[in-house]
Image (cartoon, rainbow, N blue to C red):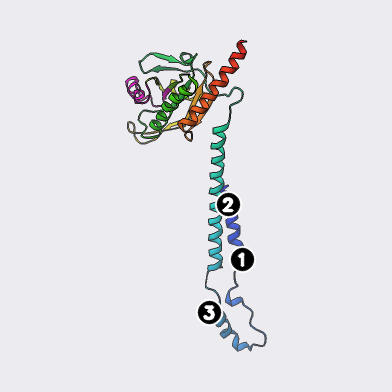
């Protein structure tokens, strides 16, 4: 879209430039003027003609700048509108069928014990991938998840397990993760592991992460900001982006829990 806007602006520039006044040397002299008067007439014409810089007059230049500004505003407006639509759809959509998200993983919990996806069977869980050295986004998201878990329990009577999966095995050891999750919720589980195991878990949930090239010890990690809802069968149910509030998450989680319970009650009958 940005390239299209640039091409449109370039064409308008050329068009405005072509429509500007001709140079004084090319202006036709009035009929009946004597040959000796041509030079004086051209000087008078040049002094009265609009001042230009090259082939484009100040007026046409202003029109071009205004057009470019308009195109830039239109591009940003359409982009913001598209993001709002995506955000709105994310808050109201229901995942239909079995999405290709989630899968087995083998990590270590905050007590140093092996922990796999099978340890979450029989419980609803919220999974969030981040790192303990995150300056702001991870703490904000984990606080929101903790609040959503408590609100969900009040709405549905079901306890949801919040799970934090570290994407920084280099710095996030067992003790670091254990101390970190205690700050957010008493039931929050913290998981870490080797780089290969962590990368495999992130890949299963389609989580992007990349270490910044600051230094070997002092660095940040760019990563997806998504929370995943998992049902008692260990299957992906829904996801929540940064745009969700704790209340919105709790409402959606409760609706998913109710829907799952009704479906499985009918299945048993």
Residue 5 is tagged as: 2
Name which residue lies at 58% across and 74% down.
23
Q: Cα distance, mark 3 to mark 1? A: 21 Å
Q: Which residues are magenta?
A: 163-185
Q: Mark 2 packing: few (<14 Cα in 10 Å), some, or many (20+)? A: some
Residue 71, position as x, y percentages in the image? 56, 54
Q: Secondary structure at mark 1?
A: helix
Q: Does residue 178 belong to the magenta stretch?
A: yes
Please state which of the two labelled residues, at mark 2 or mark 3, is closer to the viewer: 2
User: What residue is drawn where x is 54% and y is 74%?
Assistant: 50
- Using a 10 Å C-alpha cutoff, classify the residue at mark 1 as few (fewer than 14 neighbours), some (14 to 19) or many (20 or more): few
Residue position marked by numbered label 1 in the rendering: 18
Relative side of 236 to 161, left or right:
right
- Ranked by sequence position, the earlier of labels 1 and 2 is 2
* Residue where numbered disc 3 is placed: 47
Q: Are the two marked residues, 3 and 1, in contact with CB atoms closer than 8 angstroms? A: no
Mark 2 or 3, nearer chain start: 2
Please state which of residues 31 and 252 is positioned toward the viewer in this rendering: 252
Marks 1 and 2: CB-CB under 8 Å? no
Does residue 9 sit above or below 167 in this rendering?
below
Front position in the image: 235 or 2? 235
Cα gap from disc 2 to disc 3, whole angstroms: 37 Å
Q: Position of residue 167 (x, y in %)?
A: 41, 26
For the C terminus, the quadrant is: top right
């Amino acid at each position: 879209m940005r390239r299209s806007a640039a091409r449109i602006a370039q064409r308008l520039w050329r068009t405005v430039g072509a429509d500007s006044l001709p140079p004084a040397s090319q202006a036709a002299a009035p009929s009946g003027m004597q040959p000796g008067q041509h030079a004086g007439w051209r000087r008078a014409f040049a002094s009265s003609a609009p001042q230009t810089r090259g082939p484009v007059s100040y007026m046409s230049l202003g029109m071009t700048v205004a057009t470019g500004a308009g195109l830039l505003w239109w591009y940003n407006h359409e982009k913001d509108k598209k993001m709002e639509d995506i955000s709105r759809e994310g808050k109201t959509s229901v995942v239909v069928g079995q999405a290709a998200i989630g899968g087995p993983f083998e990590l270590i919990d905050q007590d140093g014990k092996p922990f796999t996806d099978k340890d979450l069977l029989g419980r609803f869980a919220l999974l969030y991938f981040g790192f303990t050295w995150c300056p702001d986004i991870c703490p904000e998201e984990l606080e929101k998840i903790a609040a959503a878990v408590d609100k969900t329990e009040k709405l549905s009577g079901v306890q949801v397990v919040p799970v934090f999966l570290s994407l920084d095995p280099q710095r996030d050891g067992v003790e670091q993760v254990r101390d970190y999750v205690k700050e957010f919720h008493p039931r929050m589980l913290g998981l870490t592991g080797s780089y290969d195991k962590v990368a495999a878990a992130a890949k299963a949930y389609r989580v992007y992460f990349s270490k910044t090239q600051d230094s070997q010890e002092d660095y940040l990690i760019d990563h997806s900001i998504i929370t995943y809802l998992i049902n008692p069968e260990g299957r992906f149910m829904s996801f929540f982006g940064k745009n969700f509030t704790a209340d919105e998450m709790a409402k959606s989680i409760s609706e998913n829990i109710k829907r799952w319970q009704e479906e499985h009650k009918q299945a048993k009958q």
